Amino acid sequence: MPVIEVTGLAKDFRSGRAAVHALRDVTFAVDEGRFVTLVGPSGCGKSTLLAIMAGLIAPTRGEARIEGAPITAPMPAKIGMVFQDPTLLPWKSALANVEFPLALRHVDPATRRKRCMELLDLVGLSEFADHYPHELSGGMRQRVAIARGLAQDPRLILMDEPFAALDEQMRTRMGHDLLDIWEKTGKTIFFITHSLTEAIYLSDTVLVMSARPGRIIATLAIDFPRPRELDIIGSENFGRIRNRIWHLISERGE
Amino acid sequence: MSAALAGHLIFAALLFGGWELAGRLALVDASFLPPLPQVGAILWGFLHHDAFIGDLVLTATEVAVAFLIAAPLAISSGFLLGERLHLAATFNPVVHLVLAVPQSIFLPVFILAFGIGFLEKVLFGITHAYFIILVNSFAAVRSIPPALVAAARVFGATRAQVYTRIYLPAMLPLILTGLRLGMILCIIGVLLAEMYASRRGIGRLIFSWGESYQIPELIAGILLVSILTIAVNEAMRLIELRVGRFYRNAAGN
């Protein structure tokens, strides 16, 4: 049974007098425990799709459902999110930032402290619990944001280009560590990126989106065995898949 | 001892040493620059003089009342303009025009409208503080990263929680800056009103000492007001820095 289903989703924006068609007829489903990535050229409506799935904005047509229930507002108990910017609260420590979603629900301090220390440990930052965001590196901040996304033990984690602001090496390492976290927690992850390498390396399934109006133009199963090592990126098969996605995007995008 | 602190001490030593030296070497007429010990003795005398303390307390009360009225009004107006941009489009240019005009030129109008006394001085203090606090409050609202609000909403924050847990702490540093500047302008407004036309208050005293060539008293009064306003400003700046320390590098976050 799919954790999330998106059917016939469309989103139009009004820009002055003209209507901008950001998304058109987007349909897909993500099964439990899968790692699914959506790739597409910049400005293709990826972030709009994610905002709809997070319940932040309403679609013009169609709908998104989580475990059968339509998403019309944020659903913090079921959907966690990691943003492109870490969006940590600068006046709170790393631990307090991870606790933030639980504090909003008035979970008692001892319980949330214990749970969130475990999460910081999972992302490898238990020694930095008392540090403030400005004292952490970009990669560390994004790790805190991942721990925060897991705090409410949601069914689905949405990730909006979470490593885009990091340098190449850090980005690769974060992807590797994310797979480790995913395997330990068994969460369903829906990930957005414009990096083809990142998409193929991480995912069970890659959805390819066209330029605006964004549509799903291909669904590719990626069957490298897991746990994956970084050297698959250099393999012939990996290159073939990357070329195929690149052609799909560039043919439609001109 | 840090280099900065050493620098400050050297500056103070030069200031007061130069003052003393100028008097001893008769570089300046002693009636214009009375020796430091004499000014100090007069200052000490002031603090044991009930009438003087009464004037000081009156001025401080006027400043406090003006500030306590202006601050919440200005913060909420700035907040409203920051949240309702169509209102800001109308009112921001007005605010900036008002800020451009030296408010002292309106004092005669205030006196015509409200007479001289407590009410007029407080109102003049309020108008001095109001606009600068408003501008900072507006900037504080606009400085909140929309992504922080979106994140809070995804994690289940209610509207009230977005205001108390995101808006309030995010706005605090700029609000505090506004309040400190507002306090300085508020003191300027009240002292100006007292010096221009008033029966009581420390501003009135200082002005009358100047008019009657009571130089030692004049300098003692100036020194005392300077010390007090510096103390208020530094206290507020300390709070500002304490709060602001979380925000270093926060822009890249």
Image: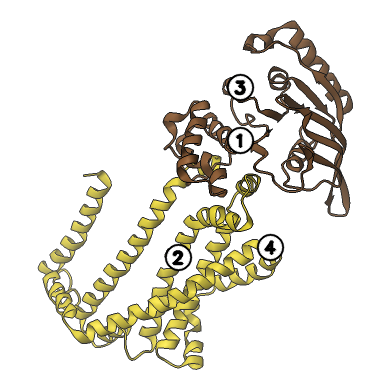
Chain colours: A brown, B yellow
Q: Report the residue at 79% width, 28% height from top.
A: A1
Marks 4 and 1: in contact by CB < 8 Å? no
Chain bearing mark 2: B
Q: Report the residue at 25% width, 72% height from top.
A: B224
Inspect the image, locate mark 2, and give the three-letter code of the amino acid beneath it: Leu
- Residue designated by label 3: A168
- Tell me which numbered mark, 1 or 3, is placed earlier along the sequence: 1
Q: Report the residue at 42% width, 91% height from top.
A: B116
Chain bearing mark 3: A
Give the alpha-carbon distance from disc 2 to disc 4, as whole Å: 23 Å
Chain bearing mark 1: A
Q: Is mark 4 on a helix, strand or loop?
A: helix
Q: What element carries label 3?
A: helix
Q: What element carries label 1?
A: loop
Q: Which of marks 1 and 3 is in front?
A: 1
Judge if badges 1 and 2 mark residues of a common chain: no
Res. B179 mark: 2
Q: Is residue B70 left or right of residue A247?
A: left
Res. A153 mark: 1
Q: Which of marks 1 and 4 is in front?
A: 1
Q: How crowded is mark 2: few (under 14 residues within 10 Å), some or many (20 or more)?
A: many
Can residue A195 be seen from the camera position used here? yes
Res. B85 mark: 4
Q: In this view, does B7 lie to the left or right of B248?
A: left
Inspect the image, locate mark 1, and give the three-letter code of the amino acid beneath it: Asp
